[in-house]
Image: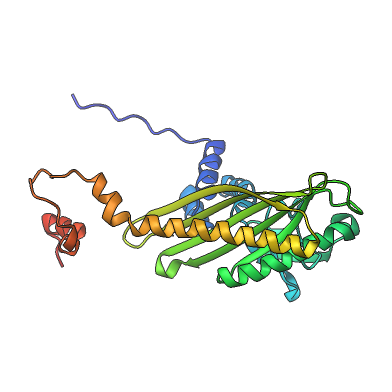
Amino acid sequence: MAEEEAPEVELSGKQKKEIAKWFLLNSPCGEIQYVAKDVRSVLNDDGAYDEAASEAFPTYNKAQMICLDLPRRMGEVLITSFGELEENRFLDPRTAQVGIVDHVKQVCTDVRPATDEELPSPYIEEFRCALDAEVLKYVGEAYPKGVCSVYCTKGKDLEGPGSDFELAVVIQAARNSPQNFCTGSWRSVWNIEFNDDMQVLEIRGQMQVGAHYFEEGNVQLDAKHECKDSTILQSPEDSAISIASIIRHHETEYLGSLEASYTNLPDNTFKDLRRKLPVTRTLFPWHNTLQFSLTRDISKELGIEK
């Protein structure tokens, strides 16, 4: 007797929303709009999709630290938790402007000047502005189309020395080329603690690289790295130069290690993953891998050769 097919179970609206939300949140860098279009089509439930999008897009935009143009060519604003003032409003410390953001459309719909309460005190701004200038110089040299911002995350109302405060440096660079089947991004966050008692700067960095190649396949990279460093507390200009130098050193070192590991991938890692002698009892010809083509062999077996 043939087995009876299990009856189809209709998903609830909440289940549809959670599934859609998962796909949106896990979209590769720069591809959420393409994913959203397909998810909406497959879901066929505008209510569930709209609810999922309203929850997923803000989280995704802040995680990817996307950069949006401010209206009237007033600059750019990074969408990060450090610059989030309230729902859909993000501060750009460099221009002292606040962008009002439509997360789902990923556009800045309006802009207003930041209030005095939203900006650091003149004492803190001197350190922040000096560091911003040095990091901007570094990013311009190191990352094509890179953007950066420096935020005060603690002690922004201090009027002079005597207490601790913290700054956060955010660097983002993305290269999206879906027509060439690839997207990629670099994101790094550097938290700097200014310890006035010990006259020391404690620096913690987190770097993240994402890449997606999808020409005749689907390969993704998501690499993370954390590090710590320190330097002495000096004048705003000298402190900024020291911090930028430390950031440059660690990011260059991490990028170099990534390049080295992937350069050695075909010669070392892939060889180690493969058995010494396959079932054919013949060594794999690593010196001439072009003679093998999985697509060609499968097409031949299925009789669909062109």
| Residue 105 at least partly seen | no
Tell me if 71 is positioned left or right of 62 in this view.
right
145 lies above or below 93? below
Tell me if 166 is positioned left or right of 264 in this view.
right
Q: Which residue lies furthest to the right in this view?
A: 159
The colouring scheme, among rainbow, by chain, secondary structure or one colour, is: rainbow
Give the residue at x 51% y 67%: 175
Q: Where is residue 163 in the image (x, y as percent from the top left)?
A: 86, 46
Q: In which quarter of the image is residue 242?
A: bottom right
Query: 24 or 185, which is in the foreground?
Result: 185
Tell me if 67 is positioned left or right of 260 in this view.
right
Q: Where is residue 158 in the image (x, y as percent from the top left)?
A: 89, 51
Give the residue at x 46% y 35%: 10
Q: Residue furthest top?
A: 1
Quarter of the picture containing the N terminus is: top left
Q: Which residue lies furthest to the left in this view?
A: 281
Give the residue at x 28% y 56%: 266
Give the residue at x 54% y 40%: 18
Query: 232 or 265, which is in the foreground?
Result: 232
Q: Quadrant of residue 76?
A: bottom right
Quarter of the picture containing the C terminus is: bottom left
Number of on-image labels: 0
| Residue 256 at least partly seen | yes
Q: Where is residue 197 in the image (x, y as percent from the top left)?
A: 82, 44
Tell me if 275 is positioned left or right of 233 in this view.
left
Q: Quadrant of residue 33?
A: bottom right
Q: Position of residue 106 (x, y in %)?
A: 63, 61
